[in-house]
Amino acid sequence: MTRATVSFCARLKNPLHLVPFRLLPLCVVSLCLLVVTSLAPVSAQVGFDRPGSDYSTFAVRSADPAVCAARCERDVRCRAWSFIYPTAERGAACRLKAQVPPRNADGCCVSGVKGAGVIEPQDGRAEIGIDRAGGDFQTLDLAADATWQTCKASCEGESRCRAWTFLRAGYIGPAPRCYLKDRIVPPRQRPCCVSGVVK
């Protein structure tokens, strides 16, 4: 065995010798980014649907999108899912999908891919998936197509109002409701609701 062959074999056993020294920091940074990206949690997309590729649809009595995500995790065939919020006409439902269709913006739904838990977005204007139970001084029955923005505006129009909670249609009754509060109560995670605090 020649000296050149021995040197080549030694380099194969220590792959860092194959990387020019000036590129070594770049390789280390790239490897760290790859590890961090693979460990970062994937979250579901609230306000998006993934229409198509359904192979199973079932009712979700608890009306909680986390049930849909968990069912997809346990099903070998499932690649993606869409949870449909309840309405005045029908209850909540989950659609399991054999493929990962592209997402479409739609307030009806929460969607995700296998491995995605449900993390409600907080955009600073409202607390999505949060209920602030208690402290109510007024309850408003809203129109069927009302959104949380209607509830927020009602609170901002009342000098006494410090916080609000919007209850989606289908959770308690056929129409959405707005609860105006004269004090700020602690938040609780519940998929039925959107809340906010008036500063």
Image (spheres, rainbow, N blue to C red):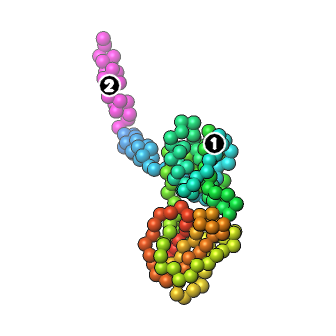
| Residue 91 screen position, x and y as percent | 64, 57
Q: Return the mark for residue 13.
A: 2
The image quadrant that residue 186 belongs to is: bottom left
At label 1, the amino acid type is Ser
Q: Which of 27 and 132 is in front in this view?
A: 132
Does 17 sit above or below residue 169? above
Point 34% across, 21% down: residue: 8
- Queried whether the magenta region covers residue 16, the answer comes back as yes
Label 1: how many residues lie within 10 Å, few (<14), some (14-19) or many (20+)? few
At label 2, the amino acid type is Lys
Q: Which of 41 and 73 is in front in this view?
A: 73
| Residue 40 screen position, x and y as percent | 44, 49
Indicate the secondary structure of the residue bearing disc 2. helix
| Residue 4 screen position, x and y as percent | 33, 18
Q: Give the range drawn in magenta.
A: 1-21
Point 69% across, 73% down: residue: 143
- The residue tagged 1 is 56
